[in-house]
């Protein structure tokens, strides 16, 4: 991948950060299952079954309070190994909901893993082809952080698009073409040189589409990810490899590239398409309100030998120093649908 990128840059000049991230991550996810101990990172559903169960119950409960409309479909974006879907669908079934399953996933490796877990699922390259009939019950956990982000950088003569060039075994970001001032939020226009602003047009486009669909078809979208509540300056592009941080400008395609999710930007995109936005709320608070305490006690009582491990998983998912506050949940709801639980 690095050689391909170098040739691309040699042939056509520097590429923008979003293109660098898009090409690197397409290769990264297409060639491996990155999840779990032996991989590069671990996600909430891989830490404990409780995460997926509570997501499933949250969706089933909203559907129930919406009057149990016919034809609801479970949709997941970037389902990884299919663990979240397995746990969510089991919890939904217990609540009387057995929806068909539609996955948005580009990685052939992960599609195979998902097919082994979820019989009868159908796959999409992007959300445009999702069914247009009934309500959509959508979840995206650690999906948006992997979508390409642009970086804009303030210079002494205004804001510029950050571009990527190649230098020996490393890639180097540098200021490129000027960005119109209108593209920069007012308070940041006079930011000191070197200030970086990240925006993810791909994420906004996906959220717009989902919000539009949910507003017209009914349903709920749950977006869970790490990120900030308000649009703010600062570089968050990071590479993750073997459970640690790595240099994002080396070895593209061999390490996971992510940015923090800008929940304010996602909520604005959704509202613009007619969906109601609820939250974001910190993941820890959300899971506590959904009853992770009771669920921890119940599972630990049923499997006393694993009690310590189950309590530890709850801590990892909810404690402020772990995933409790950096991770947040944002909900989008169709007009006429209730607010999902845990956001009050
Ligand atoms: N939600 C899972 C996996 C998170 S990893 C979990 O919580 O464990 C990110 C997931 O998004 C992977 O399944 C990856 O293959 C998928 N993905 C990344 N970029 C994508 C894109 N542009 N389109 C569709 N899926 C993508």
Image (cartoon, rainbow, N blue to C red):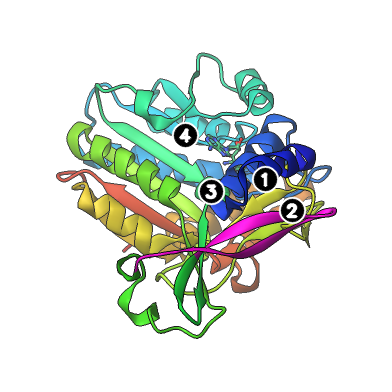
Tag nearer the camera, 4 or 3: 3
Going from N to C along the chain, the mark reached first, 4 or 3, is 4
Residue range corresponding to the magenta coloring? 161-180
Label 2 residue SS: strand
Q: Residue furthest left?
A: 336
Q: Would you name the residue on which mark 1 appears?
A: 9
Q: Residues within 10 Å of mark 1 (few under 14, many from 20)?
A: some
Q: Is residue 262 above or below residue 106?
A: below
- Ligand 1 within 8 Å, label 2 CB: no
> What number of labels is visible?
4
Going from N to C along the chain, the mark reached first, 4 or 2, is 4
- Ligand 1 within 8 Å, label 3 CB: yes
Per the picture, the main secondary structure of the magenta-coloured stretch is strand
Q: Would you name the residue on which mark 2 appears?
A: 166
* Residue beneath the point at 65% across and 49% down: 43
Tell which quarter ligand 1 is in. top right
Asked if the residue under mark 1 is in contact with the one under mark 2, i.e. CB atoms within 8 Å, the reply is yes
């Amino acid at each position: 991948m690095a050689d391909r990128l170098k040739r691309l840059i040699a042939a056509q000049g520097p590429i923008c950060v979003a293109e660098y991230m898009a090409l690197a991550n397409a290769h990264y996810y297409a060639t491996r299952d990155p999840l779990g101990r032996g991989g590069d990172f671990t996600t909430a559903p891989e830490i404990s079954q409780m995460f997926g169960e509570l997501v499933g119950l949250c969706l089933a409960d909203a559907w129930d309070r919406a009057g149990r409309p016919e034809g609801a479909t479970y949709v997941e974006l970037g389902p990884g190994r299919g663990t979240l879907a397995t746990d969510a669908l089991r919890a939904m079934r217990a609540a009387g909901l057995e929806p068909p399953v539609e996955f948005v996933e580009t990685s052939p490796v992960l599609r195979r893993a998902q097919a082994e877990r979820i019989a009868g699922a159908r796959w999409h390259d992007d959300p445009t082809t999702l069914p247009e009939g009934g309500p959509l019950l959508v979840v995206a956990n650690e999906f948006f952080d992997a979508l390409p982000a642009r970086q804009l950088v303030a210079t002494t003569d205004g804001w510029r698009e950050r571009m990527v060039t190649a230098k020996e075994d490393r890639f180097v970001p540098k200021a490129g073409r000027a960005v119109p001032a209108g593209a920069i939020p007012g308070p940041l226009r006079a930011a000191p040189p070197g200030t970086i602003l990240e925006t993810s047009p791909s994420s906004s486009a996906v959220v717009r589409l989902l919000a539009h669909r949910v507003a017209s078809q009914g349903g709920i979208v749950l977006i869970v990810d790490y990120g900030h509540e308000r649009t703010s300056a600062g570089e968050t592009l990071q590479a993750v490899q073997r459970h640690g941080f790595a240099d994002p400008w080396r070895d593209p395609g061999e390490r996971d590239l992510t940015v923090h999710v800008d929940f304010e930007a996602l909520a604005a995109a959704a509202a613009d398409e007619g969906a109601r936005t609820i939250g974001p709320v910190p993941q820890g608070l959300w899971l506590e309100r959904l009853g992770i305490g009771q669920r921890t006690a119940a599972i630990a009582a049923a499997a006393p030998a694993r009690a310590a491990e189950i309590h530890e998983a709850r801590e990892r998912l909810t404690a402020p120093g772990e995933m409790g506050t950096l991770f947040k949940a944002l909900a989008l709801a169709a007009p006429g649908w209730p607010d999902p639980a845990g956001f009050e």
